[in-house]
Amino acid sequence: MSSNKINNKQTVTFICSIESWKDLKYLFLRDNQAVLEVADILEAIEGVASKSLEEIDLPRARFERALLQCLKYNESESVIELPLSNKRYYALHAGIIGLNTTWTNLQTVSLGGNSIGNEGAVALSHDATWINLQTLNLEHNSIDAEEAASLKKNQAWPQNLRLFYY
Amino acid sequence: MTTVLPASMTIIRGTNNKGLNLQGVIVSSCDKLSEKNRAILQKRGDYGVFPETALNKLFPSNLRDITEVIVVNEKLAPIHARIIGSNTYWSNLRKLDTLRNAIEEEEGGEAIGGNESWPQLEELTLVRTQIGDKTAIKVANNLIWKNLKKLWLASNKISDIGAIELERAKSG
């Protein structure tokens, strides 16, 4: 239902939560006028009944299996790596990833080659959950040294964290 | 069996200088329509716009063979969507693709969305067809399409009303 005239974010959430679509694999709702914030997007994704979702394309952001797997399907403790390089992600995706409070065993975050920018870096820097993080790869995301410094100051993450951001 | 749209009906008086006019006539359930009659429908009616492949499916020799009807970017108008939507003998139809045709709402989109003769339909594409909420509601409430797996409705005029109806019907 991309490029239609859906204005209300609740409508998007409703569509995502259709209970009878248990085998839904793809849901395309991009280019509608509804404006979804980070919390709305998380609610929409969580509401999807299907366990087979491969891709969901919401008005402001697209998510495919790799991230959906971690956000929605995997047990939180089993999320060790986020392999999300070159996915055309931007600050909003980083905001959603940064909001997570359950991936306590996460060791590697690969977000290189995206467009999360300084805003995305700041969103990640607020995380207080990834206490086992070993590698944070943010190369080629247009992140300034100042914002990178804020990442280094994160007290929850291990001291020997390998951070890449150029 | 034929259906004549009420909108096309006009009272004819005097000498007919214009010849046979079959505009608005929908022909269905024909058993071996002759080439001659088919040509008349193409020339005098609304069937001229259909490509030969689609026409062969509208007037087939073997009804059970028809599993796909693809009429992409064929300049179809609402009447042509109504011809397709009025079909009652594509009982094995699995895929219907009407991408990029101005079939619009009441005459066209609703006729397809309300069809109750295609129980095997798995994929329906109505992308860029100028449909709106009324068609979405028809599709949402179509109880025959139990096998529908792929529904493409992008680039149309469906608003929150049609989208919510789709949600309600499918949740019910």
Image: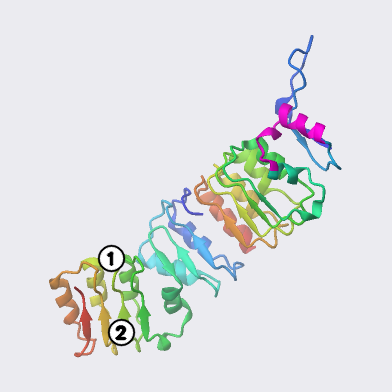
The answer to whether residue A161 is above or below residue B79 is: below
Residue sitting at x 35%, y 62%: A37
Q: CA distance from mark 2 to mark 1?
A: 23 Å
Residue sitting at x 45%, y 85%: A75
Q: How many marks?
A: 2
- Chain containing mark 1: A
Same chain for labels 2 and 1? Say yes or no: yes
The answer to whether residue B84 is above or below residue A27 is: above
- Chain containing mark 2: A
Q: Nearer the viewer, residue B166 or A62?
A: A62
| Range covered by the magenta-colored residues | B35-52
Residue B23 visible, this angle? no
Magenta stretch: dominant secondary structure: helix
Q: Does dot 2 land on a helix, a strand or a loop?
A: loop
Residue denoted by label 1: A115
State the colouring used for the structure image.
rainbow
The answer to whether residue A143 is above or below residue B72 is: below
